[in-house]
Amino acid sequence: MMASQKGTFAGVLLCLVVSMTVALQVSIPQRFYEFARGDNITIPCSFKPKNPINNLVVISWLAEADKPGEPEVSVLTSYSTGDLDISDRYEGRASLEQDIAKGVANLKLSSIGLQDNRLFECRVAIPKDDKGQLADTTRLVVLVAPSVPVCKVDGKAEYFQNISLTCQSEEGSPLPTYKWQGYDVRNMPRAPAPRTTDKDGVLSLFNLTMESSGYYVCTSTNKIRSATCNLTLSVMPPSMALGSTAGIIGGVVVGVLVLLIILIYCCCCRKKKDKAEEYAMGVPEGEEFHDDKPVVNGEVRQTRSKEGDDEDHPPKIVDRRDQYKERSEKDYDDRRSDYDDRLPKIVDRRDQYKERSEKDYDDRRSDYDDRRSDYDDRRSDYDDRRERHDDRRDQDDRYSDRRDRYDRDRVYDERSDGGRYSDRYDEPYDDRDRPPSVPANKPAKPLLL
């Protein structure tokens, strides 16, 4: 029985192999391809139909959808009749390198970018040849160096608080990996605290202390290159509780002050009202009226006597308006007298300031005149030296003119004499054999007879 089962299994395998050899086969050599961003690339695809000659062959290239669950994105579709349909998304960037006889259906993309970092599928459809492997897929990996990451602090860097240091690069393919490294205030690397976690670019710090302060560096790395960012962490004492307490205390103080001001104002108003009522109603019977203020400037204190006083002297009410007027006039006279006393002093100070100003101006003017005179003297000396220099220059010019005339006359004489004296001047001078010359005015010797 075991032999019969083995035979059956072998037969099934043989049928599969035979069916595979006689059915359509589409294949892409590699499971993924890596290219740098901006390159022009070719993704190979080959197919083997069941029949070497077919009336219609449809080659399609599809791309993975942007979001899961959405339909695939069509790149292009080619027909053996010569028609080629390219989607708007890949218009001008995609083309097909095909040879149906040789089974070639290569996809060519130009200027690839991160948007092309996805799965691509090569599909071949031939009527009456729908068995076998009709399509194959591969992943295109666009290599992009990670951008400079952004480092941030999430939370409040205060004692006994928990915070997170985040690090994220906006782009990078393959996706970059992140690693945090901490340095103390002396810029020395240090090991992370026991509860510290570093995952996907997030460094979690728990129960902050003063030792948590320092310099933190995040490195974003993929197979192209790496980039870094850094931040300085300064752990401070709790400030929120102190701020709220100070705010509460300040509010209470302000409220108490406002309440005291209101009470004082009400008391003052009440006292004024009571005094006005007393003056309006008079003094009760059996009591003697006394002014609150002492008698000044010869004022006469007016009182109301008790019953039985002399009726010839009726009570008199002090005219407060007259008293206020008198005090105002006296205050004005005092201020006026004080002003008259200060006025001479002000005039004296003004005169002193004016005298000092005029004296300073005269001194500065005299100094300026002295400097101006010195400048004129130096200028005159310079002009004298300049005139003497011009005179010497004129003398040199006259001497040069005489020398030129002398040279010209000498040359002329030599030319006119024909060189008669040139030979004589060239010979050495020797007057030893020559008799001495007789002066012209010497008398002649007498003849002897």
Image (spheres, helix red, strand yellow):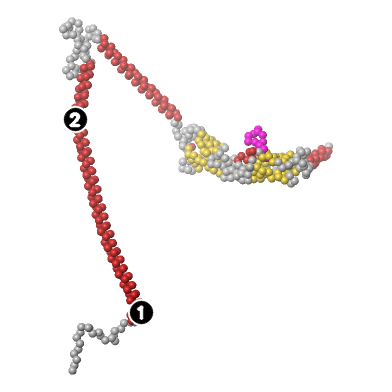
Magenta segment main secondary structure:
loop
243 falls in the magenta region: no
Place of residue 69 in the rendered image (x, y in percent of width and height, measured from the top left): 65, 33
Classify mark 1: residues with Cα within 10 Å, few (<14), some (14-19) or many (20+): few
Q: Is residue 20 above or below residue 325?
A: below
Q: Nearer the viewer, residue 25 or 13?
A: 25
Say whether residue 289 is left or right of residue 52.
Answer: left
> The residue tagged with tag 1: helix, strand or loop?
loop
N-terminal label among 1 and 2: 2
Determine which of the numbered discs, if any, sits on residue 341 in the image: 2
Determine which of the numbered discs, if any, sits on residue 418 in the image: 1
Amino acid at dot 2: Asp
Place of residue 181 in the rendered image (x, y in percent of width and height, measured from the top left): 52, 41
Which residues are the magenta region?
64-76
Q: Residue lying at the far top in this picture: please name it.
A: 308
Q: Residue lying at the far front in this picture: please name it.
A: 416
Q: Quadrant of the C terminus?
A: bottom left
Circles 1 and 2: CB distance less than 8 Å? no
Question: Does residue 212 appear in this view?
Answer: yes
> The residue tagged with tag 2: helix, strand or loop?
helix
Separation of residues labelled 1 and 2 (CA atoms): 117 Å
